[in-house]
Amino acid sequence: MSKPHGATAGKLERMLEKITMLLRKAESTPYPAEAQALQEHAERLMVRYGIGRAQLDERTAREGRPREAVVERRFEVGGVYRVGRLRGLSEVARAFPAISVLQSTSGNTSTLYVVGVESDVAQVLRLFESLLVQIRSVMAAWWREHDKGHLPTEALRVTERRQFQMAFFDTVAGRLRDLHAQEVADAGSGTELVLAGRRERVTEALHQMHPFLRSARSRPINTGSWTAHRAGQAAGHRANVGQRGVAEGSRARLPG
């Protein structure tokens, strides 16, 4: 598979189409080994697509043409597991080298603000949509298999599910960071500089969008068992990254 260096807009669009095709096949096959192979291929292409878009953007700027716009998209996270999901999805978004994420909470709803260039934000949107669909299914299967309904209080049951989810999202984020590091190294000299320039653009735009931004104090949350953590990690290693497309510019309400 060719690296993103020198990629054209047409090649990148074909790569995006192939990612979608691979992930659809991974969803539909009844064979776990085949699904895993398709998934891993799609993940690597997803990372290469992001690097290729950054390189193409840099070339068009040198030619005097406009760069991709930096945008902000908002996502509301509700439900009893919103705190764990908010933290987990934030980690997944930050696995993309040039994405910034802000958070706010009001009442029973938390909001993620994802800031980056349009193509990167679109990738994060696809990823959020995919992971939220997947975790609902895998967590329900884990809960049934291990008979977690025996836990004596609802608070304990919520804590176990939250721990599973956070471990799931953290594992996916780590997997994506490793892929980015490997692909940047393979892409050759100058790639890290291109991505660093992209990050600087996003950081500058973020300060312009939110000039009075300040860090909030992190709130501790109750953690679940090591068993739930390990189960979430295992599910995260099997997660199918980015299966469903979401239109750019949309505002999505994440399931509770």
Image: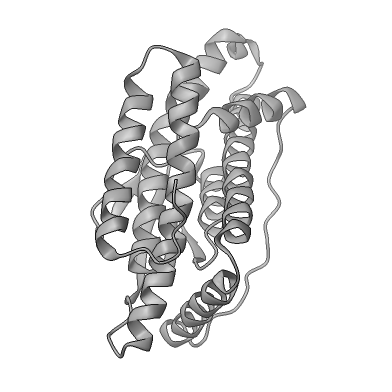
Above or below, comparing residue 3 to residue 233 in the picture: below
Locate residue 125, reporting x and y percent: 36, 52
- Camera-side residue: 199 or 165? 199
- Camera-side residue: 65 or 216? 65
- Camera-side residue: 107 or 13? 13
Residue positioned 43% across, 47% down in the render: 45
Could you tell me which quadrant the C terminus lies in? top left
Locate residue 180, reporting x and y percent: 57, 55
Locate residue 123, reporting x and y percent: 38, 54
Which of the 4 quarters of the picture holds residue 143? top right
User: Left or right of 199: which side holds 18?
Assistant: left
Residue positioned 33% across, 49% down in the render: 15
Above or below, comparing residue 2 to residue 204 in the picture: above
Looking at this rendering, what residue extends furthest in the right direction? 226
Q: How is the image coloured?
A: one colour
Residue positioned 55% across, 61% down in the render: 187
Above or below, comparing residue 203 to residue 23 in the picture: below
